[in-house]
Image: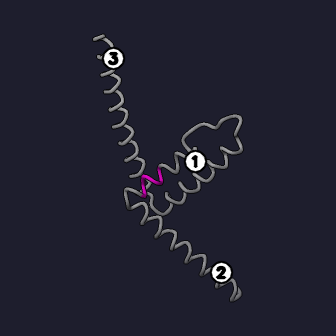
């Protein structure tokens, strides 16, 4: 092995260690977990591709899958917590919407 290769390997290990620390720090915060889930949603990881935009959608999804891989690798519990928090938020919003729909139905019946 050459001196150059030793330096390159050391730099790669340092970058990997820094990435692991950064991902763990971000996923340790509620804001970081919300951002992560929002970015996954925007990337299209959880939706079907539009037939007219397959290549574009595939590229976006690939970026989202890479982010998901990195977070699962370095902060698996943060990824699981982010998904659980998002599910809880969606459930609460759906409940609020259902209550509003019920109020609308009652209002229409009075008229």
**SS for dot 2:** helix
Label tally: 3
Of the pair 96 and 66, the residue shown nearer to us: 96
Residue behind mark 3 = 105
Q: Where residue 4 sits in the image (x, y, percent)? A: 70, 86
Residue 84 painted magenta: no
- Mark toward the start of the polypeptide (2 vs 3): 2
Residue behind mark 1 = 43
35 sits left or right of 49 in the view: left
Q: Is residue 98 above or below residue 93?
A: above
Q: Where residue 57 sits in the image (x, y, percent)? A: 65, 43
Q: Residues within 10 Å of mark 2 (few under 14, many from 20)?
A: few
**Image quadrant assignment for residue 6:** bottom right
Residue 34 painted magenta: yes
Quote the CA–CA distance across marks 3 and 1. Answer: 36 Å
Residue behind mark 2 = 8
Of the pair 66 and 54, the residue shown nearer to us: 54
Instruction: Tell me which segment is drawn in magenta.
Output: 32-37
Q: Quadrant of the C terminus?
A: top left
Quote the CA–CA distance across marks 2 and 1. Answer: 32 Å
Query: Main structural element of the magenta stretch: helix, strand or loop?
Result: helix
Q: Residues within 10 Å of mark 3 (few under 14, many from 20)?
A: few
Q: Where residue 18 sits in the image (x, y, percent)? A: 51, 73
Residue depicted at 37% across the width and 33% down the height: 94
Residue depicted at 52% across the width and 45% down the height: 41
**Image quadrant assignment for residue 9:** bottom right
Q: Quadrant of the N terminus?
A: bottom right
């Amino acid at each position: 092995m050459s001196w150059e290769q030793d330096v390159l390997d050391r730099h790669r290990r340092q970058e990997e260690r820094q990435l692991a620390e950064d991902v763990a720090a971000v996923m340790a915060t509620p804001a970081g977990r919300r951002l992560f889930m929002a970015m996954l949603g925007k990337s299209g990881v959880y939706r079907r591709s539009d037939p007219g935009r397959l290549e574009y959608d595939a590229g976006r999804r690939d970026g989202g899958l890479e982010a998901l891989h990195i977070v699962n690798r370095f902060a698996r519990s943060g990824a699981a917590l982010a998904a659980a928090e998002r599910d809880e938020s969606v459930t609460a919003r759906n409940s609020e919407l259902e209550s509003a729909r019920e109020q609308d139905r009652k209002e229409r019946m009075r008229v």
